Amino acid sequence: MKWPKGVTIKEVGPRDGLQNEKTFISTEDKITWINQLSESGLKHIEITSFVNPKWIPALSDATAVVTGITKVPGVTYTALVPNLYGLERAFQANIDEVAVFMSASETHNLKNINKSIDQTFPVLRDLVRETISAGKISRGYVSTVFGCPYEGHVDIDSVIRVSDRLFEMGIAELSLGDTIGVANPKQVQEVLEVLLKRFPADKLAMHFHDTRGSALANILISLEMGITIFDSSLGGLGGCPYAPGASGNVATDDLLYMLHGMGIHTGVDQNKLLHASQFIQEKIGRTLPSKSFQAASSGMGGKLGKTV
Ligand code: HMG
Ligand code: MG
């Protein structure tokens, strides 16, 4: 088997991880946590979203978070943005990168952003254009690639249609979302076989939620298919409030444990992240889902490895 020498991890915990939490994490604690993440070797951190705070109250302090963190040179800080009003707020806070998002399935798109797929295209086209003309990077997400909480099966043609349009708009990279964690490795292989005929591997990222415990298996097959960018969330926090039953992303801790064990370089220091996981677990007030974090914090298996 031929594995890549290194992969890029895009930490989404402060956004995807916190957006669905019932406990409001104070702005000060969010900032402390993001600063810890910034010092771990992670180069990409999605730190908040500039959406309607009535829809996502957990991230209503987006401006204070972006302006309050200590930016580390070489780290790209991203925020999720749904429309031009959100973009204005994100620019005022001087965000580095803007992530736009929509779904491959109509019902999830409507529930999540209150628009049909066709109504969403012009909104995102304007967003991407304005982002690029401001000299910033635009990242795209397509949700429900592997299944929709409302419609079930999602046709690959719908995924292709949305992906084509997002790339035509000028996004730098597309993250393929298994929003409700239903994918299996065979399905991932089939979807990637189709998409990799249209888009280069280095423009695709995988965003697996771990609802059913198959995220690491899905990452392994994605690695085999040539994908080297993965979104993950520290401790396994997360979920989409408009996707019933969705739980957290694959835990960054578990992903690092697997990759470093395989000798795949990430540049991230697991021990530094261990402290960041401990910090956010205390603030959230419940046990984090990450298995390797729980094993490490209970002293099982000795010390975690260092940066590989
Ligand atoms: P809407 O209600 O249709 O918006 O929401 P509107 O344009 O009709 O405006 C209604 C009100 O919202 C107005 O205020 C606007 O000012 C305000 P009012 O006059 O009522 O006082 N508003 C805003 N306020 C702050 N920032 C904004 C903004 N826009 C409007 N940007 C909207 C449309 C898209 C805004 C709404 O549906 C929304 O915020 N949705 C976001 C939902 C969300 O964040 N979901 C989770 C993230 S997606 C995800 O988790 C999936 C992902 O992880 C990948 C995967 O796992 O698959 C990315
Ligand atoms: Mg997500």
Image: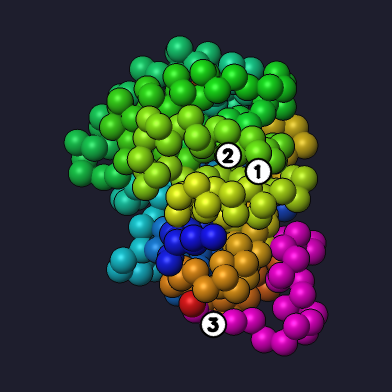
- Residue 177's place in the image compared with 67, above or below, is above
Residue at the image position 49 percent from the left and 61 percent from the top: 3
* Residue 33 position within the rendered picture, expressed as x and y whole percent measured from the top left: 55, 67
Looking at the image, residue 63 sits to the left or right of residue 113; the answer is left
Amino acid at the residue labelled 1? Pro
Extreme-bottom residue of the structure: 302
Extreme-front residue of the structure: 1
- Circle 1 is placed at which residue position? 185
- Decide which of tag 3 and tag 1 comes sooner along the chain: 1
* Residue 193 position within the rendered picture, expressed as x and y whole percent measured from the top left: 50, 35
Q: Which of 4 and 299 is in front in this view?
A: 4
Q: Helix, strand, or loop for circle 3? A: loop
Work out whether residue 234 can be spotted: no
- Circle 3 is placed at which residue position? 306
- Residue 251's place in the image compared with 170, above or below, is below
* Residue 252 position within the rendered picture, expressed as x and y whole percent measured from the top left: 60, 62
Residue segment shown in magenta: 282-307
* Residue 260 position within the rendered picture, expressed as x and y whole percent measured from the top left: 56, 72
Query: Which is more foreground, mark 2 or mark 3?
Result: 2
Residue 293 included in the magenta stretch of the image: yes
- Circle 2 is placed at which residue position? 189
Q: Main secondary structure of the magenta part?
A: loop
Residues tagged 1 and 2 counted as in contact (Cβ below 8 A): yes
Residues packed near mark 2 inside 10 Å, few (<14), some (14 to 19) or many (20 plus) = some
Looking at the image, residue 144 sits to the left or right of residue 44; the answer is right
Residues packed near mark 3 inside 10 Å, few (<14), some (14 to 19) or many (20 plus) = few
Work out whether residue 219 can be spotted: yes
- Decide which of tag 2 and tag 3 comes sooner along the chain: 2
Q: Helix, strand, or loop for circle 2? A: helix
Residue 271 included in the magenta stretch of the image: no
Residue at the image position 46 percent from the left and 49 percent from the top: 227
Residue at the image position 26 percent from the left and 45 percent from the top: 136
